[in-house]
Amino acid sequence: MGSSYRQFCPVAKAMELFDERWTLLIVRELVLGSEHFNELRRGLPRMSPTLLSKRLHQLAAAGIVERTTNGSNVRYVLTPAGRGLEPVVEALGTWGARWTGRLGDQDLDPTLLMWDMHRCVDRTVTPDSRTIVQFTFLGTARASRRWWMVITSGDVDVCDEDPGFEVTVRVIADLRALTEIWRGELGWSHALRSGAVVIDGPVELRRSLPTWFVPRSFGAAAPSVAAPLVSDG
Amino acid sequence: MGSSYRQFCPVAKAMELFDERWTLLIVRELVLGSEHFNELRRGLPRMSPTLLSKRLHQLAAAGIVERTTNGSNVRYVLTPAGRGLEPVVEALGTWGARWTGRLGDQDLDPTLLMWDMHRCVDRTVTPDSRTIVQFTFLGTARASRRWWMVITSGDVDVCDEDPGFEVTVRVIADLRALTEIWRGELGWSHALRSGAVVIDGPVELRRSLPTWFVPRSFGAAAPSVAAPLVSDG
DNA sequence: CAGTATCCCTTATGATACTG
DNA sequence: CAGTATCATAAGGGATACTG
């Protein structure tokens, strides 16, 4: 943990734990349901494994995370204190959605977007049979341009290589547009009308696909209406 | 501001601003009503003026604070975006009060406690005439042992030198005990019964003094009932 | 899968003294 | 009162390669 502020104020005592880079984002990932080291890495791709490891130890020492092993199966789980952070993450997300302004180009990341979306598929509204959604992003480096999401009744997977199954429905999207949809700032209908996103496939799937992905994004409720802050992108 | 996380997540975008040391504590001070540079310094005594200045500029650049000058009078005021951080500070404070465990000795600070208390005097319940409360802390370095709070109808001042007025009521307290009272973890009545705090003066003032100070501490509502985290103090 | 081991280097920030 | 200037040190943390 960072060094002490030497203040009795509860805000200061809390921030002693969270004023270090990445810490609260790990908590966010855990709140969102990640449990394994490499799951966390996928949600925090810019973080070095060394640092992630260090932070997890710190969080465990602080009583926020518990590391449990079951044979060779390692899991990180929030303790009650860790779950108590959900309102903090929520408040930060709400503020960030409201006041943080337009995303910089560098904040757009197809890998992260696919990872985030794949864990928020509502399988009560997706087709019963195995469904493959192919995503193509425009204006993105070739390597991370094309993605496949394989939705089965038991699981959702994403990969950047053709899994070989026949594609059920295609999504061709401007990366920023889909990201903004995901953040709740842009509506599917508007994006489809403007052509920033195109859905290609059987009509009933084209219709329902926008309901398949249910952002658990914090603060998604409040699309920014008033003037946001200046972006420093 | 700290470097970018390169994530579109609103929590990450928010934490780009707040994962640097002191930043959110400055916001806390502003929320609590400090406006001038040296007021902020008093609430953040361990922060160097250079760093405070830097942070204020960062907060201004981020649109959270506005610096206004009126002749030679400089004020820092939260913008709407800054005021929007109140729920964040609140959530952190609530979490900190609930889960942060027993204060370390190094978190106890009579100067800070006096500064914090003096701005939370409820002048609707203090005597009408000028009232001087003398605080004496036990087990504290001589220099910061004795304080005078001068409460008038228009103002409240604290100083660590005898202002020369006749003392109206005396408070002799264990520093930790008064700090815990202030945090809402310990009741006045309990502290008075145990002798950790003694109030000396006219009976009606002895009775009412505990109501004079109304903590605006965040999260003071929830004295920690369940097991708090291990303190690393 | 679940991490460690290194290495380097920027940067953050604490301390102190000074100025308009 | 409201800050700047300067300095030295420690760390924080990014990148990459490697291990059980």
Image (cartoon, coloured by chain):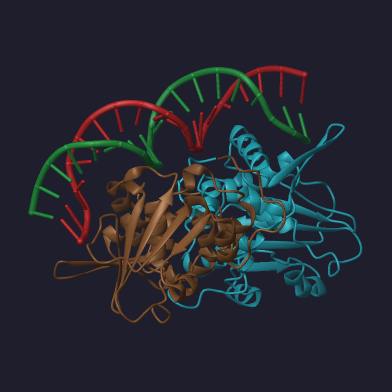
Chain colours: A brown, B cyan, C red, D green
Up-down relation of residue A27 to residue B186 (above or below): above
Quarter of the image for residue B124 reads bottom right
Residue B142 in percent (x, y) is at 60, 46
Residue at image position (29%, 55%) is A160
Q: Residue furthest front?
A: A202
Image height check: is B133 above or below A87? above
Q: Position of residue A119 (x, y in %)?
A: 38, 68
Percent x, y for residue A134?
A: 35, 61
Q: Residue at x 68, y 58 (%)?
A: B84
Q: Horizontal placement of B92 versus D12: left or right? A: right
Viewport quadrant of the N terminus of chain B: top right
Residue in the image at 50% along x and 43% along y: A105
Residue at position x 84%, y 64% in the image:
B123
Q: Is residue A215 placed above or below A92 in the rendered structure?
A: below
Q: Say which of B157 and A116 sits in front.
A: A116
Q: Can residue A219 be seen in this snapshot?
A: no
Which is more toward the observer, A73 or C20? A73
Task: Confirm whether residue B144 shows in the render.
Answer: yes
Asked which quadrant contains residue B179, the reply is bottom right
Image position of B139 (left or right of B42) = left
| Relative to C4, B220 lies left or right | right
Q: How many marks?
A: 0
Residue B76: x and y in percent read 75, 43
| Quadrant placement of the C terminus of chain B | bottom left
